[in-house]
Amino acid sequence: MKALPMRGWSIMAMVKTFDIDMDAIIGSLPCPFCGSETMIEGHPFGDSATESFRVTCEQNGHSLDRWDSTKRAAIVAWNKRP
Ligand SMILES: [Zn+2]
């Protein structure tokens, strides 16, 4: 496997790619209650200018009782849940 050529990439392109890769690496654990697949749920609060996120399970809608400002924070919280 050859390394991907990084020269010539813009900073934004690298940041964007890094974020996508980090999401894939972090992932999210299956639902601890029913074992089903999970997904990221987005919800606008207040003036709707910003969205908050949390992980929910697809089968029964189980979720943590909290919202985070980024998808990554929501995934981290889900993976660290008690
Ligand atoms: Zn569930």
Image (tube, rainbow, N blue to C red):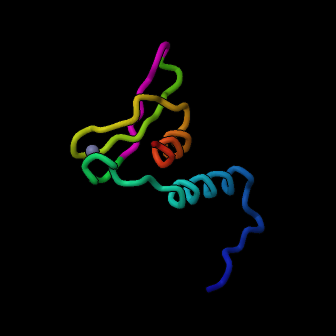
Horizontal and vertical percent for residue 22? Answer: 58, 56
Residue at position x 35%, y 54% in the image: 30
Horizontal and vertical percent for residue 65? Answer: 40, 29
Q: Nearer the viewer, residue 10 or 77?
A: 77
Main SS class of the magenta portion in the image: strand
Question: Outermost residue, left direction?
Answer: 59
- Span colored in magenta: 39-47
Indicate yes or no whether the magenta region holds residue 42: yes
Q: Nearer the viewer, residue 5 or 74?
A: 74
Residue at position x 66%, y 55% in the image: 13
Horizontal and vertical percent for residue 51? Answer: 49, 28
Q: Is residue 31 left or right of residue 67?
A: left
Q: Nearer the viewer, residue 57 or 45?
A: 57
Residue at position x 50%, y 40% in the image: 74
Q: Quadrant of residue 41?
A: top left
Write down which quadrant ligand 1 falls in. Answer: top left
Compared with residue 8, is residue 5 higher up or lower down, i.e. above or below? Answer: below
